[in-house]
Amino acid sequence: MDTSTKNLNSRRFKGRGATLNPTSRFEVLDAEAFDDGWDSLASMRDETGRPQTEVRPDRSRSVIATNQSPDIPFDQSINTYRGCEHGCIYCYARPSHAFLGLSPGLDFETKLSAKYDAPELLVRELARPTYRCTPIALGANTDPYQPIERKLTITRKVVDVLARHDHPLTIVTKSGGVLRDLDLLASMARKDLVAVAVSVTTLNPELARKMEPRAAAPHRRLEAIGELAAAGIPTVVMVAPVIPGLTDHETEGILEAAAEKGAWRATYTLLRMPHEIKELFRNWLLHHEPMKAERVLSLHRQCRGGRLNDPRFGHRMRGEGTYAALIGRRFRLARKRYGLDREIPELRTDLFRRPGDQLRLL
């Protein structure tokens, strides 16, 4: 594995979220980058000093992932990309990059893998006689509409496969790019085959630019909610994650803005900091919000039993304690006030047409 870019000195890079590139927790050896006098560090970056995005092919032999987590509302998912160029510093998926031998820091947002053959693999898996149709979630780990999707269109092709076979799906994104597929999604919505959730963490564009540097601006996400809802697509606004002491005061404002755009429902999750996220997020706070850092971490610990992370099912999404309960109560009251408690229709599985079934009818 290439270790030349690991453990770069803590610093801010324009357009990137992480300020560190810590070694993968599975690595036995560590390495620290330094300039040997031949501009070796500069070679890792372009002329502006910023790390560049690399996209590599993902060689997975299957595309549908399954899970049995009791606090996740789906049992099948597809992630068309590993790593995410959005660079959200709080992303709970960052630690998954360690399984690739890469850093959950800058590597996560600059060294990406793309499942170029995802559409073909999907058709093969849907055609299996043993396949049981349940809704497939897109965006469970990394955003299916991150910037590289504009060029690669892998997500578009996956959605097209699901649409052609009347297979239900859910989408989670923080990108206005989802509107590119409005034609497919609107058609599926008329058959109760799709629901879309748009994540809005903050309405403050300056904070969003630092915290989610390559995700859509907050106003653009609200516009996406409006256009999705206007097309008849069940649309959820996700206040995710709520960050105590940094964004929790915005809950009511986000819900009000989403309701005005026509969102059907609202959900929220509390900030999670598994594995390397703790170090990455703490360092990000010290760089970008130094006056708030101590208070944010203190309030977060109050919601996590004195720790920075609580991985227990049933607790990890909402937290516990007085402050977590206050966040939950405010959210429920605001959701009711703005009418964001509308039920999403149950997605239909009875319409599913297995690839190849049509041939057997001839």
Image (cartoon, helix red, strand yellow):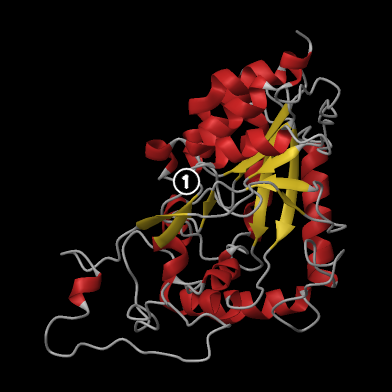
Residue 257 is left or right of residue 195, and the answer is left
The residue carrying pointer 1 sits among few (fewer than 14), some (14 to 19) or many (20 or more) residues within 10 Å by Cα, namely: many
Q: Does 181 sit above or below residue 323? A: above
The answer to whether any part of residue 113 appears in the image is yes
Residue 227 is left or right of residue 168, and the answer is left
Quarter of the rendering containing residue 293: bottom right
Q: Nearer the viewer, residue 13 or 67?
A: 67
For this orientation, the residue located farthest to the left is 38
The answer to whether any part of residue 291 appears in the image is no
Quadrant of the image for the C terminus?
Answer: top right
Quarter of the rendering containing residue 2: bottom left
Q: Position of residue 59 (x, y in %)?
A: 52, 55
Q: Nearer the viewer, residue 85 or 259?
A: 85
Q: Position of residue 315 (x, y in %)?
A: 84, 67
Residue occupied by mark 1: 146
Q: Position of residue 5 (x, y in %)?
A: 34, 77
Q: Position of residue 72 (x, y in %)?
A: 80, 53
For this orientation, the residue located farthest to the top is 362
Secondary structure beneath dot 1 equals: loop
Q: Does 287 sit above or below residue 261? A: below
Q: Which residue appears at 79% of the width and 55% of the height?
A: 67
Quadrant of the image for the N terminus?
Answer: bottom left
Q: Does 339 sit above or below residue 42? A: above
Q: Which residue appears at 83% of the width and 59% of the height?
A: 69
Q: Which residue appears at 67% of the width and 74% of the height?
A: 274
Amino acid, disc 1: Gln
